[in-house]
């Protein structure tokens, strides 16, 4: 068995692990990164990037279908799923190749294989890797667990990627199913459900909770719900998927409503999008003494330390908001910590984006959360329909909303539903991180005509100074 001695070993090369490895390399820490399957993790291979590629394709398909509104006649668009998959694959390959190049370029050793913790020795922690070249032991002072997460299943719905798909299966379909049922009205279910609705599937969303998109701003969720309705997507709230039966030519799904009544839905494919669970099994955590919580997430403090000295954990595997940029922030911070710098995860706001149509983006507190924290609030809202840029790109759904403390006028939260919301939200995240007041947003000149003017106008509306709507 070969042996490798390094200062730090990172297990998992997702958006948590690979930036951590790159920063460790930049900080001159001798580092190895081990990956069993996906250089770039879920995000680059079967998550953020491929999903946004198909969302872009679906949006283009829909826009072309409405081009005649702008006086452009192109005829009815047709869809070649094989070509779409090939294009999406190319995007993924470019990015995953880039990850390897960046790691190597920063002096990081790449190790292919599945890693687990072994008993520590006097010279450091030991990690065993089973890879294509056999078994290897890595001895390291510091270990970073960045093993991420995988889709959750529910009893009776074994994922076979034929009838019952998870998000990975839904991203590689070579045809558009006629009838698609999405179980789960969270962001992954709605993003992919909308894609197939745009491509022509009859989509039904079944959600056990009374609302879509969890705790996101209710008004923003309302915009998405209206768009779903307009697209012909049926949404069943307070409805639980109980079981399903394969009838040969179709699946028949049984749903239980709030009143206990059962109903059935016919489907060609069922997409299970009910959440994700941490990859903590087969890692040797118990033997090494690394504590996990009731739900299996590794317990880590604000310096990403686990219950064992010099074993750290980052990203989805420690729970919280399971988002790529959260994993990256933790990975980069941890590299500083391992290098001996004074650093900790100290974040006032973790922005989040849902790439539905229109997009929804959020930073900071919702109105309910702000009130629950004892704030009296002022709220300013500006509709995209009153925005020159939104009208001129024929995309006027949605609004920007700014919430501030009524007394101090500190910006507490910004919520945007609308075209480009995902790009607009970074200004809000900066404002909240810097403790800005609404006048900071209002007095900053925003270029015209841009969608960013919606944020400025919403800030102005919060203090009764909006110019392009009547202040209330
Ligand atoms: C369909 C979909 C869409 C998404 N869209 C977004 C989005 O738009 N924005 C966003 O912020 N987030 C999005 N996410 C979530 C995002 O992908 C995750 O939050 C992010 O990938 C987590 O990063 P990570 O580094 O913690 O883990 P992962 O990306 O899961 O990476 C962990 C890596 O560890 C490897 N690994 C696991 N165990 C071992 C082992 N024992 N040995 C070696 N390697 C191992 C895995 O193979 C994997 O490559 C999406 C997810 C999905 C599924």
Image: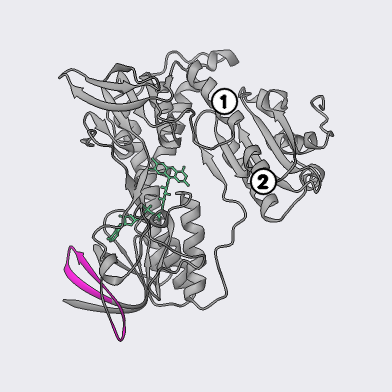
Q: Label 2 belongs to which residue? A: 428
Q: What stretch is highlighted in magenta?
A: 121-138
| Residue 331 position within the rendered picture, expressed as x and y whole percent measured from the top left | 46, 63
Q: Does the magenta stretch include residue 198?
A: no
Left or right relative to 64: residue 283:
left
Q: In which quarter of the image is residue 269?
A: top left
Query: Where in the figure is residue 328, as x and y percent of width and height?
Result: 48, 57
Q: Is the residue marked 2 within 8 Å of ligand 1, measured from its CB?
A: no
Distance in Å between CA atoms under marks 2 and 1: 21 Å
Q: Which residue is at the far bottom?
A: 122
Please state the horizontal and vertical placement of residue 307, each as a whole percent of the image.
39, 70
Report helix, strand or loop for mark 1: helix
Q: Position of residue 161 (x, y in %)?
A: 23, 35
Task: Tell me: residue 263, above or below residue 102.
Answer: above
Instruction: Please determine whether, in this image, residue 401 is positioned above or below residue 261.
Output: below
Q: What residue is disc 1 on?
A: 222
Q: Which of marks 2 and 1 is nearer the N terminus?
A: 1
> In the figure, residue 135 lies in which quadrant?
bottom left
Question: Dot 1: within a 10 Å radius of its alpha carbon, few (fewer than 14), some, or many (20 or more) residues?
Answer: some
Q: Which of marks 2 and 1 is in front?
A: 1
């Amino acid at each position: 068995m070969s042996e490798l001695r390094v200062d730090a070993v990172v297990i998992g090369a997702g958006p948590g692990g690979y930036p951590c490895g790159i920063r460790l390399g930049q900080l001159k820490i001798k580092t190895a990164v081990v990956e069993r399957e996906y250089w770039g993790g879920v995000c680059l291979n079967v998550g953020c990037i491929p999903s946004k590629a198909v969302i872009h394709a679906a949006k283009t398909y829909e826009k072309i279908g409405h081009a005649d509104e702008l006086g452009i006649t192109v005829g009815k668009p047709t869809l070649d799923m094989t070509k779409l998959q090939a294009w999406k694959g190319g995007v993924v390959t470019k990015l995953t190749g880039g990850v390897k190049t960046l790691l190597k370029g920063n002096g990081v050793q790449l190790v292919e294989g599945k890693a687990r913790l072994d008993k520590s020795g006097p010279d450091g922690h030991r990690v065993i890797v089973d890879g294509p070249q056999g078994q290897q032991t890595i001895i390291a002072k510091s270990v970073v667990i960045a093993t991420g997460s995988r889709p959750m299943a529910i009893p009776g719905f074994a994922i076979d990627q034929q009838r019952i798909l998870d998000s990975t299966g839904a991203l590689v379909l070579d045809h558009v199913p006629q009838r698609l049922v999405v179980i789960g009205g969270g962001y992954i279910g709605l993003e992919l459900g909308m894609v197939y609705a745009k491509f022509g599937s009859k989509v039904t969303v079944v959600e056990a909770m009374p609302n879509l998109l969890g705790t996101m701003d209710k008004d923003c969720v309302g915009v998405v719900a209206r768009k779903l309705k307009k697209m012909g997507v049926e949404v069943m709230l307070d409805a639980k998927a109980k079981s399903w039966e394969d009838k040969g030519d179709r699946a028949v799904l049984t749903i239980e409503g709030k009143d206990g009544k059962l109903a059935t839905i016919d489907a060609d494919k069922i997409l299970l999008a009910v959440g994700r669970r941490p990859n903590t099994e087969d890692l040797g955590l118990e033997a090494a003494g690394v504590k996990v919580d009731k739900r299996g997430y590794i317990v880590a403090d604000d310096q990403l330390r686990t219950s064992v000295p010099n074993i750290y954990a980052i990203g989805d595997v420690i729970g919280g908001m399971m988002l790529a940029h959260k994993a990256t922030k933790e990975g980069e911070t941890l590299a500083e910590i391992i290098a001996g710098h004074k650093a900790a995860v100290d974040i006032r706001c973790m922005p989040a984006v849902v790439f539905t149509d229109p997009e929804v983006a959020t930073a900071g507190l919702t109105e309910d959360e702000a009130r629950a924290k004892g704030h009296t609030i002022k709220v300013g809202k500006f509709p995209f329909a009153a925005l020159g840029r939104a009208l001129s790109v024929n995309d006027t759904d949605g609004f920007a909303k700014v919430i501030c403390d009524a007394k101090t006028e500190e910006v507490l939260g910004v919520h945007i539903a609308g075209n480009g919301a995902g790009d607009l939200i970074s200004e809000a995240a900066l404002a909240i991180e810097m403790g800005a007041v609404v006048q900071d947003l209002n007095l900053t000149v925003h270029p015209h005509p841009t969608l960013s003017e919606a944020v400025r106008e919403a800030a102005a509306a919060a203090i009764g100074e909006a110019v392009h709507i009547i202040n209330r």
